[in-house]
Image (tube, helix red, strand yellow):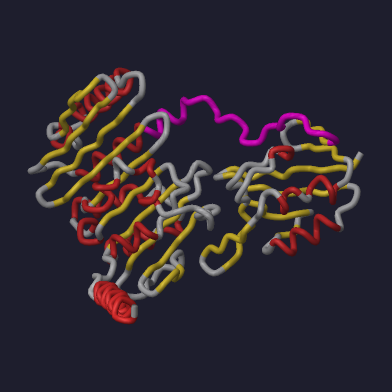
Amino acid sequence: MFPVRAARTSIATWVGLAAAAAACHRPAPTARERVLAGLSADAIGVAVADGRALSDPRVRGVLDAASARWPASLGCLVDAAVASDAIGLTINRAGDITVVAALPRPPRCPALSQRAPGLWIATLGAGPSTRAAAVLDDPRFARARPYLETSPIAGVALGDIHVLAAAEPDPLDAWVAIDVPGGADAIARVVAEQLDKLQREPSTAPVAARLHTSRPGPTQLVVRLTGPLDGDLAAAVRTVLAQVDVAADHAPPAQAAFTCPAPATGITCTGGTRYRVASLPADLSPIVTTGHPTPIVANGSVTGLRLDAAVRELGLEAGDVIVAMAGRLVTSRMMLTDRIAHARGETTVTIRRGATEAVLQFAER
């Protein structure tokens, strides 16, 4: 028996040594891989790019045109993106934006805070959920994965309409594939109208001449831009954004973000923000026990507590951010728990949902 046991021990030893050797020779993750691993899957839109591709003058011009609409505090992100080894961005259903950048040196951008050595993050809104997996682990992004991993510039948006895009600056080639369940005819008509407007505008006609559309199937439309390009790509982007603004000005107003939930025992609601409850401590406690709020840290400061789960009896959704209670900021679960426990008579809870903020009013019967 001893020789058999010795042989098994020897085999196990060699297997262990081989595994250790393989681990030692496993290549370190690339900058793109680190960025993708840092992008949370609680997203409906993802974009990722190499800094070298973004530094191309034509692409940089497009970034500058788009960034004119960003909050001023995020303006420095364009310079950081161009200087990065790789950069990624996500947006979730609540409108929260997260940017993760792999940078060779610390950035001069107050919007970015360090997440790990060489990896920096900026958030607008609640930021990523601490419980969400990485983007590439989510099967919803399986089709986009090859492009997110390898294309110099790539993006995907998921919703009623699925959009997948990829681009490279040299040689210039960019395409957008739009998938519409049920048929893409309506989208094709809108795209044709926009292209017609670009062709009639002298400053954008050279770019429009390089845009080509195709219909691979009844539910898909593909728009492709190929070089060489003599026109000003940034000017074309500014024109399209201006057209979007005009359309938005004539669009019906968005519905209120806060509506009354289905009736719950002991809780009534009117107007979406006014609640009557039997007991403030008892009826507000699910915000903590069910919602499991976690602090949002943006640029080194706690900006609120994000709900990881919905509190349906109070009309709260996963991703909502508790900003304040009784008009006072809350920066920890313990602080929120204490204020709920000592609430009597009337109180308020300030909630941020995407770009919308509301003050919920609670009063005991």
Kindly indicate the quadrant of the structure image that contains residue 296: bottom right
Kindly indicate the quadrant of the structure image that contains residue 271: top right
Question: Chief secondary structure of the magenta span?
Answer: loop
Q: Is residue 281 visible?
A: yes
Vertical side of 56 occupied by 211: above or below: above
Q: Which residues are magenta?
A: 244-266
Residue at (50%, 55%) from the top-left corner?
A: 128
Image coordinates for residue 65, horizontal then vertical, percent: 31, 48
Residue at (27%, 27%) from the top-left corner?
A: 194
Q: Is 5 positioned to the left or the right of 130 in the image?
A: left
Instruction: Work out whether residue 67 or residue 211 is closer to the camera in this orientation and state it.
Output: 211
Instruction: Work out whether residue 2 or residue 104 is closer to the camera in this orientation and state it.
Output: 2
Q: Where's the N terminus, which quadrant? A: bottom left
Instruction: Work out whether residue 295 or residue 363 is closer to the camera in this orientation and state it.
Output: 295
Q: Is 320 positioned to the left or the right of 42 in the image?
A: right
Q: Where's the C terminus, which quadrant? A: top right
Q: Is residue 20 visible?
A: no
Image coordinates for residue 33, horizontal then vertical, percent: 30, 61
Residue at (29%, 80%) from the top-left corner?
A: 3
| Residue 187 included in the magenta stretch of the image | no
